[in-house]
Image: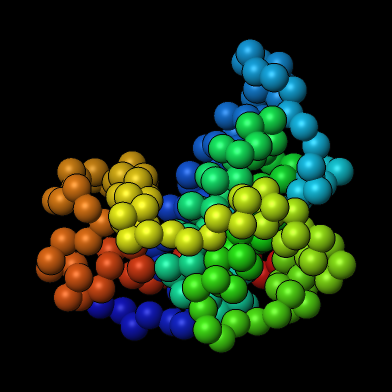
C-alpha cells in the first residue's frame, strides 16, 4: 500500500462533495424553471455569480488548510440539513453552496474541536473577508436555531447515508456489510469514512 501524504483527504471529503453536488445541480434545475419549485430566497450565503472553484476542490482546500478532523465534515453535513429544513425557501444551489459549506465546517470545528483556527484564518481559506465570515457565522447559528449538539445516533445515521453514497461512487459497487456506520472490525482499524485516499489537487 502506497504511503499516504498528509494532504490526502479522507473519503468523507469526496463523498460529501458528491452529495452536495447532486443536491446543488437538482436545485439549479428547479431555479431555472425546468422543474416545478418555488423561487428560492436570497440569503447572506448567496454570491453574485457561480464561483470558479468546484465544490470538491473547495472542500479539499478547506481540508488542506483548516486541519480539522474528518468527524467535523459529518457534523457539518448534519448542520447543513438542519439549516435547509428550517429554511425551505433557501435552496442549496451553485450560488450559496460554497459559503454554506465553509460556515457549516467552521461551526462544526468550533463545537467539536478543542483547538482550532479562528474566523480570520477560515476567512482566508474560504476566500472572503473577516467581516463576511463573522456575518455568515451569526446567520448560520440563527439559521440552525443554535441546535449544535449531535447525538451518537444522529451521527452514525449520517455516516450510514454517506456510506451509501460511497457505494454509488466506487466501482464495483458492494452492498453494505452493516446497517451502522462502523462494523466491529472497522471500529478496530479505523472508519472506512475517515480513511485517506490519494487525489489530484487544484491549488486555488
Residue 187 lies in what quarter of the image? bottom left
Measured as percent of width and height from the top left, residue 138 is found at 75, 60
**Residue at 69 percent of width and 30 percent of height:** 89
**Residue at 73 percent of width and 29 percent of height:** 40
Q: Is residue 177 above or below residue 197?
A: above
Question: Depth check: 124 or 90 in front?
Answer: 90
Measured as percent of width and height from the top left, residue 173 is found at 24, 43
**Residue at 53 percent of width and 45 percent of height:** 81
Residue 196 lies in what quarter of the image? bottom left
Measured as percent of width and height from the top left, residue 8 is found at 46, 74
Q: Which residue lies furthest to the bottom in this view?
A: 115
Question: Depth check: 141 or 173 in front?
Answer: 141
Question: Depth check: 197 or 166 in front?
Answer: 166
**Residue at 59 percent of width and 73 percent of height:** 110
**Count of numbered marks:** 0
Looking at the figure, which quarter contains the C terminus? Answer: bottom right
Can residue 200 be seen here? The reply is no
Can residue 34 be seen here? The reply is yes
Looking at the figure, which quarter contains the N terminus? Answer: bottom left
Q: In this view, does 1 lie above or below 165?
A: below
Q: In this view, does 109 lie above or below 144?
A: below
Left or right of 86 on screen, residue 161: left
Left or right of 168 on screen, residue 22: right
Left or right of 1 on screen, residue 124: right
Residue 83 lies in what quarter of the image? top right
Q: Is residue 184 above or below residue 100?
A: below
Amino acid at each position: 500500500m502506497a504511503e499516504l501524504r498528509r494532504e490526502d483527504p479522507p473519503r468523507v471529503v469526496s463523498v460529501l462533495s458528491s452529495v452536495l453536488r447532486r443536491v446543488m445541480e437538482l436545485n439549479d434545475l428547479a431555479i431555472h424553471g425546468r422543474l416545478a419549485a418555488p423561487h428560492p430566497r436570497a440569503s447572506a450565503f448567496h454570491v453574485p455569480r457561480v464561483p470558479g472553484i468546484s465544490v470538491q476542490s473547495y472542500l479539499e482546500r478547506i481540508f488542506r488548510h483548516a486541519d480539522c478532523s474528518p468527524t467535523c465534515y459529518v457534523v457539518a453535513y448534519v448542520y447543513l440539513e438542519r439549516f435547509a429544513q428550517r429554511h425551505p425557501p433557501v435552496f442549496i444551489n451553485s450560488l450559496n453552496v460554497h459559503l454554506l459549506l465553509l460556515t457549516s465546517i467552521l461551526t462544526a470545528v468550533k463545537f467539536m474541536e478543542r483547538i482550532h483556527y479562528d474566523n480570520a484564518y477560515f476567512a482566508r481559506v474560504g476566500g472572503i473577508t473577516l467581516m463576511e465570515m463573522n456575518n455568515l457565522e451569526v446567520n448560520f447559528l440563527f439559521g440552525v436555531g443554535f441546535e449544535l449538539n449531535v447525538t451518537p445516533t444522529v451521527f452514525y445515521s449520517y455516516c450510514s447515508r454517506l456510506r451509501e453514497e460511497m457505494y454509488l461512487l466506487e466501482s464495483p459497487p458492494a452492498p453494505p456489510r452493516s446497517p451502522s456506520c462502523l462494523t466491529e472490525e472497522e471500529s478496530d482499524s479505523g472508519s472506512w469514512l475517515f480513511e485517506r485516499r490519494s487525489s489530484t489537487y487544484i491549488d486555488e
